[in-house]
Each structure stands twice: as structure tokens, then as C-alpha cells.
Amino acid sequence: MVISHILSRLLLVVLASSIALACPARAEGLALLRDAEIESTIRTWATPIWTAAGLDPEAIHVYIVEDPQLNSFVAGGQNLFLNTGTLIRSETPNQLIGIMAHESGHIAGGHLARSEEAMRNATIESIIAMVAGVAAGVAGSSSGGGAGAAGVLAGQSVGLRSFLAFSVTQEASADQAALTFLDRSHQSARGLLEFFEILQQEELLSAVHQDPYLRTHPLTSQRIDYVRNHVLHSPYSDAKDPPEWVEMHRRMKAKLAGFLQPPDRALASLKPGDSSIAARYERAIAEYRTPDLKKALPEIDALIRDEPNNPYFRELKGQMLFENGHVGEAVAPYEEAVRLKPENALLRIEAAQVQLETNDPALVGKALTNLNDAIRFEDRNPDCWHFLAVAYGRNGNMGKMALSLAEESIANGNFTEARQQAARALKLLPPGPDKQRALDIQGEAKREGRP
């Protein structure tokens, strides 16, 4: 998991790590992080909630925002965003499950409908940038920076400015739905109550010091009392998180600490003699980031020996090798990670990138297989489309390359480039579904009519 600013897609380093920026740092320095393990962990916890809510888990996308503040939100359809600060400050899986149950209440309740038109074609990156801009505007306004705040908000449409904010009525409705989903899945609501109590302590702070969750999710004493009363009477209030979920939580926090803190601070925070998997995981990450590969590789190899079927340890080893110039040696760990967890799209994208970086023609076919499998779920991921374009280009399929570049441009919100690449694809592709898709992209890009 390396967090690096992406300067050029031509460098092919966008997804070089288990956590990578999906876009350069944008407004207020916020960035989107992608991590196969953490996203899988979150989906494991949330799937029972989504099922209880009558939502299709496969239709919901999870995104992690690199921001130390407490916040979570849903936007742009069935997209769930969680700040790293929310993940790191959580004490149990149940607290995060309660938060996700509440956000699922907004989705199930149709509370996003008012902004559906405005957000239909928004890229994930633009949502993150807009959230940062609105948060800065609110804080600036609260601290007397009215003119600056107006400048931040002026460029956003009314729908984009307000699509995060819910009314007290909608918040109460989402709470009630969350409690229903938790009961249906036989889980405790204590975590949600604990989260609300943390927020309640912040209400007395000035807006500039409050976590942004309070700005878009108005909290009232009635809402807290309602959840507290439910905890007192629900038969599931004493339900415990499964031990494997608790361990997943430990590893998630260790991984985030290892990658987001300065390496020396991460190493200093580890207790001497702590031989837990989570501590060793954090140590391996911090040593690799120091960088000290001579210490990091033995650490990750020991973890692999202890858990040979853990795909994420293999992924981390591949990352260590790849980012230190051992591209050929990185292929095997990444391919093994995919073999162990073939349904994980991000692992397939990472493996494909490394396969392409070897410049070995024999690996292009494997890269195409990985990317075409990944794109079924990551159809809004511009990097996946970019790597597909590279792979098709090396295979000599110029029509599919142009179509993939058009898809990449649509995902990035670059409609001028999308029109150009779609037109190119139409000249090169034979009749069939791909040519029809190029026509669709061309039409969508023309309707948008913006660069």
C-alpha cells in the first residue's frame, strides 16, 4: 500500500500498490484510496446489512477517502464513501457496521433521488473534489471567510452543493431503517449508539473544528434517545462481533497505520515483543516504506509461511518487489494472490499492470484476461480501462484499444477526448456490440457537451 501522487498515466504506476491513489490529490488534499483487502473487509461486514435492506451487494461500490476526519456518505447512486479517519478511529467492527447501516438507510429510503440527475454522470474523483470544496466552504463561512466560501461554492450546481446534506427527518428515517437492518441481521446497535455519542461530544465545538459528518448529518437528542431505547430493548444488543471480524478490524487498522503514518512513527508505536499478525503486518509495511527491503521481505515471507492462503500477504510482497524495480519477480506473488482470490477485481488489475510492465509478450494475454474479468465490476475505473488499452495495443487490436481509451475518458469525465476516441473506434471496429458501445459513448459525450 503506497500512497503516491500520480503525475502521468503513461508511467503506468497508478495501481502499483495495494493502496494507490485513484486520482491526484484534489481540493483540500483529499484523495481516493483503493485497497483490495480493506474494501473486501468492509464488504464482508456490510453485506448482511445490504441483504437485510433488500439491496444488491454487487451493485454497491465502496470507496475510501484519505481524510483523518470522521465522515461517511453515499452519493452518485449506490456508492458508499468512508473516510480513513472513520476507519482508524473505530474501536470495533460493530461501530463501522452501525455507520454503514445508517448510510444504507439513506440508499434504501431513496434519499438520494433529489440529486440523481445532477450526479448521474459525475466521476468518483469529481465527487471527492466537490465534497472537499463544500466542506471547506462551510468551514470558511463559519470562521468568517464568507467571500472565500462563496468562491468555493460558486462553481457547484445547487444539486452538487446540497446532495450530501440530509434533513433531520431523513436522518431519523435512516436511523430507523438502520436499526431494522441490524435486527434482521441479528447484530447489535450499540456501535451506532457509540458513534452518535462520540459525535454528540463534538456538537459544542465550532463548525471549523467539527468533523464533517455533523455538517451533513444533523444530530439531535431525539435521534440519540431513539437509538438508545432500541439498544435497551433489542434482543440482539449483546451480540458480539465474530472473532474473525475482530481480527480483520485489527489488520485493517494496522495496515492503515503502516501506510498512512510516517514509517518511523509506525515502527515506534508498535509494542516491543508484540508478535501478533497485525503488529507484524504493520511492521513489514513500515519497514518497506522506510525503505528497508532487507528487513521487509523476511517479515512478509514469515507472514506468508504462517498464512499461505492469505492473498493480501502475497499482494504486499509483489508490491514490495515491483516498487523496488524487481518487476519480473513481482509477477508470481501477484498471480498467486489472484489465484487465491480470483473474484477480487483490484487484485486482477494490479496483477495485470505488473504483467504489462514486464514487457513480456507472453503475459499480455494473461493481463487481458485479468482486466476483462475486473472491468465487469470496475466499469467506472479509468485505470482499468487504461491498462486494457495498453494490452489491446500490444496485441495489435487498435479498435478495442480506441474503445478502451474512450471508456477511460468517459470515466474521467473528459468528454471531448471520449468523442474523439469513440470516433476512432467506429472507424476500426467491425459491426457488433463493441461498435454499438462506441456509438453509445459518442452519444453520451455529445449530450454532455463539456470538456
Image (cartoon, rainbow, N blue to C red):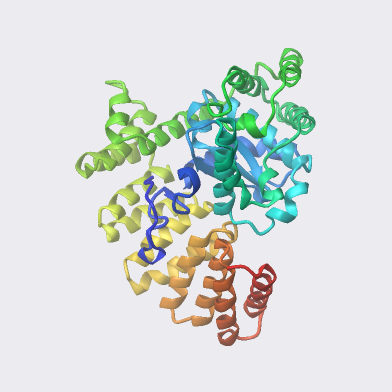
How far across and how far down the image is residue 330, in percent? Answer: 31, 56
Image quadrant where one finds the C terminus: bottom right
**In the rendered view, would you say 82 is above or below 211?**
below
Image quadrant where one finds the N terminus: top left
Q: Nearer the viewer, residue 37 or 405?
A: 405
Residue extending farthest to the left is 294
**In the rendered view, would you say 230 is above or below 96?**
above
Q: Quadrant of residue 191?
A: top right
Q: Nearer the viewer, residue 342 or 129?
A: 129
Please give left or right for residue 373 compared with residue 271 in the image. right
Q: Which residue is painted at 53% across and 66% down in the image?
A: 408
How far across and how far down the image is residue 335, in percent? Answer: 40, 56
How far across and how far down the image is residue 123, in percent? Answer: 59, 56
Q: Nearer the viewer, residue 317 or 224?
A: 224
Q: Is residue 342 visible?
A: no
How far across and how far down the image is residue 180, in percent? Answer: 77, 28
